[in-house]
Image (spheres, rainbow, N blue to C red):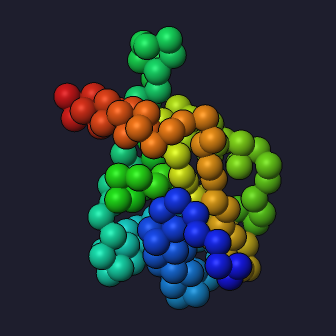
């Protein structure tokens, strides 16, 4: 570790630790949903609050144009997108960045259980400040609970 601290690094470190435990226990080769269920158990074991398969609204010009289901929203701050592929490609990273922008979140993790070794990428939405991210998240959550 280089000693550099990133925003929400305390949370992302726990998420990655939980994912490593799941991958070391199950290995690769299962469907994404299996890893998602196991990761939910590990998040609870690590004391992380999370929402699984959370429907979040996508807005364009102030109008809702659709929804997208997030694999996990952890501690109301970090989006976690899961994959079970042999390798992550640039398109998956671009997709995760687009989701962060659409949800108004700043930090996400792209986690791939499909390779022999666990792959994870930290994803940053550099377009949003923490103030606007919190407002967008609260708007999206209140709209999804309506």
**Nearest the camera: 2 or 17?**
2
Residue at the (79%, 53%) spot, across then down: 89
Task: Say above or below: 88 vs 44.
Answer: above
Residue at the (58%, 63%) spot, across then down: 6
**Nearest the camera: 105 or 141?**
105
Residue 129: x and y in percent read 51, 39
The quadrant of the image that shows the C terminus is top left
Task: Say above or below: 41 vs 72.
Answer: below
Residue sitting at the far bottom: 25
Residue 100: x and y in percent read 55, 41
Residue 34 visible: no
Residue at the (43%, 33%) spot, across then down: 132
The quadrant of the image that shows the N terminus is bottom right
Q: How many labels does the image show?
A: 0
Residue 111: x and y in percent read 61, 64
Residue 52: x and y in percent read 36, 55
Task: Say above or below: 90 vs 120.
Answer: above
Left-right relation of 50 to 105: left
Residue 3 visible: yes
Residue at the (52%, 68%) spot, across then down: 9
């Amino acid at each position: 570790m280089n000693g550099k601290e990133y925003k929400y690094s305390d949370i992302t470190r726990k998420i990655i630790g939980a994912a490593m435990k799941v991958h070391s226990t199950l290995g690769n080769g299962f469907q994404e949903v299996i890893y998602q269920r196991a990761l939910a158990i590990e998040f609870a074991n690590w004391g992380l609050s999370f929402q699984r398969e959370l429907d979040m609204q996508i807005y364009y010009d102030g109008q809702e144009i659709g929804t997208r289901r997030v694999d996990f929203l952890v501690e109301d701050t970090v989006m976690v997108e899961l994959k079970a592929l042999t390798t992550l490609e640039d398109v998956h990273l671009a997709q995760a960045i687009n989701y962060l922008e659409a949800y108004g979140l700043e930090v996400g993790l792209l986690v791939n259980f499909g390779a022999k070794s666990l792959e994870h990428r930290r994803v940053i939405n550099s377009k949003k400040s923490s103030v606007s991210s919190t407002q967008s998240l609260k708007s999206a959550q209140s709209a999804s609970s309506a």
